[in-house]
Image (cartoon, coloured by chain):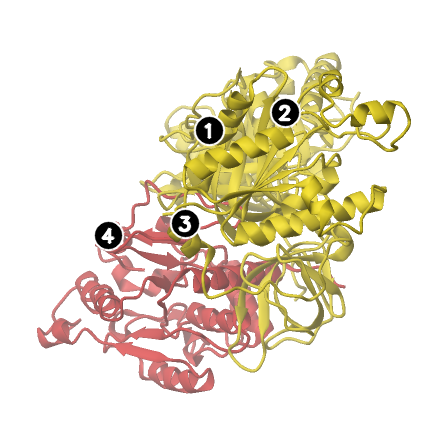
Amino acid sequence: MTAEAERLKIVFVGHVDHGKSTLIGRILHDTNSLPEGKLDLIRQACAAEAMEFEYAFVLDALLEEQAQNITIDTTQIPFRTAERRYVIIDAPGHKEFLKNMITGAANADAALLVIAANEGVREQSRRHAYLLSLLGVKQIVVVVNKMDLAGYSKDLFREIEREYRAFLATLGMEPRLFVPASAKQGENVARPADAVMPWYSGPTVLQALDQLDGSRTAHEQPLRFCVQDVYRFDERRIIAGRIESGTLRVGDEIVFSPANKSSVVATIETWNAPSRSSATAGESIGITLREQIFVERGYVGSHQQETPIETNRVHADVFWMVDSPLRKGAAYTLRLATQEVRCQVVAIEQVMDSATLGITPGERDVARNEVARVTLQTRAPLVVDNHDRIAHLGRFVLVDQRRICGGGVVFGGVYTDRTSVKSQNISWSEGKITAHQRATRNGHRGAVVWLTGLSGSGKSTIARALEAELFRRAIHGYVLDGDNIRHGLNSNLGFSPEDRVENIRRVSEVAKLMADAGTVVITAFISPYRADRRRAREIALESKAEFIEVFVDAPLPVCEQRDPKQLYQKARAGKIRDFTGIDAPYEAPEDPEIAVRTDQQTVEESVSTILEQLLPRLRPEE
Amino acid sequence: MSARTHLDALENQSVFIFREAYHAFKNIAMPWSMGKDSNVLIWLANKAFFGRVPFPVLHIDTTYEFPEMLEFRDWAAKHYRLKLIVKINEEARARGVGYERHDPVTVTHELKTVALQQVLAEHKFDALITGIRRDEDPTRAKERYFSPRNAQYEWDYKDQPPEFWGQFASNPAPGEHVRVQPLLDWTEADIWRYIEREKIPIPQMYFARNGQRFRSLGCSPITKPVPSHAATIAEIIAELDQTKTSERAGRAQDHHERNAMQKLRARGFM
């Protein structure tokens, strides 16, 4: 007996009445996948009812048998070609289509999209393609069906191909193949249609499926080993989890995020199986490490050179599946691989109706069956990848009241090189008093409020005013001021690029410690580089503190005119070098939590804008 | 490295589910009938937890067990170092519930389902790991890997939580428990191929003796052998490729009345 290879899962979609069921019935018939006598039974039943036999009845009959009196949400139907075995995933029903399609298509390796030649590209042809793109199903075969009703016209086929290809391109999708066929007549499904479509020399539907990639390419991607648990059943300390992408080998140095500690893989543990030296994507494994670093469920192992993103803020497209709407300001539990964190919806940028693909820009509640572009802020660090880079680490579900309410895919995250800031093998020591206890005692959580902006934009002024406002509210706030820091802690640093980076790193570390102590730290540094601010965020997240980036924004001419310390004047005169805005760049934040315009707002207005968004985040978790 | 097989994919997924369940629930138990699927579950648990089953294994003893099965139970419990809990619905037996006087649906309900509910209540289990497969029975087509049951042990198949991207309904409401079903995607043939590949011990009653073998094993008075000459796993697999009768054809409680299985299941049967 030869071991049977993994099956390819294909989801079948298409506009209603474009012949999806007929195509499935035809494939089952032509590949000899039907139980013996089934077809005769259906033919007899049709004859008795004086109905014309249709291949779609085959699928109906199978479903009926499976379903009895319960409705099926997704069906899995096996068939095989000479090349390999397949599972067809069919998501019938229009009412719960989104939920069914997501459940069915989320695990598909490929999709087959049916378009009727006589009707062309229709609403659902577009909608289904959009959902496939959202779910990251990349391998697509388009079958232009019912060619018999279109006179097997080459021109019509090419026209549909051109139109649909253009539409798919707007979604960033590139279909593998367009195949003209007639499922009803059996033309070009299993048997080539030389007689009726002599102009077509490409593969049949089945050949097109056989050309899809069976072996998933996930093992060639960067390693993501998602920890499920740490077992100590005996003398071994086994880190158990699944490899979502990439390859892990004994002897590899693995960095675990978010703690950023690394160790070397000592063994891959097995039971009743030969010992092994490597494992790849899709495998549930257990490993032991040479050095015993702290690891727990939710940690993600990767290789040093290709670490994932660590953040507390993600942009995502979220689809919603329950009646109670997704709202701005609402809190949910976010689950991504084995991570679980609380998060808050801080912005809803646009909402799309998944049926019509009509977009409403701006903020409103997100109803069932809608897809929204949102920004989420998490209460603890989250390890993610952009969905288009590593799908398994770029998708999550939102849970409310114990129920999975929606799912989302991450985009636009920024990768940073973490090799330079890593502290080797020093673990973050947890005291007896937890952050939660401190927050309860203080009445608020610790946080880092990171002000960034040009010299003269008003950072120090706003920082001082904000500190005073917090004090009035019995919140421990403290301003870390650039000049004060340079007097002591950083007195050995100059203004060279390296020293500036080190300056910001030390400030970030101090801010992290103070936030961990329960203080709301306000920093006021130009901090002109995105990468540095990104690192400041990652450092703050190590202590599980809130990190809030505030862009103190004023145009350069305004700042230069203010010039409180006459620095612009000196820079223009060439007396100081590398001055931000003059002869050194300022990289404005692309995605700050809060932005204030000090050329348009008074100091009080700026401070109240900040407070409005800051105070809710300082509340202790219940 | 050789390409992964269909069985590898099933094994990896089952191990993943075992570990998710072990993390999500404080108080898990795994019903064990000593049948082939149950023994595959024990095997997969050993794979998931590196040579141990870290939760108790439950045998709901109807008192109508085949002696050979009890013999196998005692051997396997020792072999795998299982924490075995044997449960009999003593109260029903005392009332005289049995095949001698009652129909199979009633007996199955009293001696299996009610016994299970009793043991769940006694030990406050919040999750049960079961060997349910989608291909076994039409009512099982809509099952999930993690399938919540309410306090009355009922299954609301009309409003099931979606299950995708490896995220399951892993936090039941108070009073609910969750059925975790790591074999959901396996077929009868997969089970046999895996038993063959891994050399998993199973009771000998599955193999043909005197032209008969048991395809599915339940209570002795109501479980009949099927005609067969399949004396090895390879022969059983070859036989399955030919056969068109269902696996549970020899199980009387399924056929006692129309929709018997569905009735049993809605009331908490597995």
Amino acid carrying mark 3 in the image: Asn
Front position among marks 3 and 4: 3
Please name the color used to draw chain B. Answer: red
Which numbered disc, 2 or 1, marks the residue that appears first in the sequence? 2
Amino acid carrying mark 2 in the image: Ser
Front position among marks 3 and 2: 3
Tag 1 residue: A612
From this view, report whether residue A310 is shown above or below residue A473: below
Please tell me which residue is depicted at 49% across the width and 70% down the height of the picture.
Answer: B45
Tag 4 residue: B263
**Mark 3 and mark 2 on one chain:** yes
- Residue A501, image x, y percentages: 78, 45
- Label 3 and label 2: CA atoms lie apart by 72 Å
Indicate the chain coloured yellow by its letter: A
- Disc 3 is placed on an element classified as helix
Q: Would you identify the image quadrant in which residue B267 lies?
A: bottom left
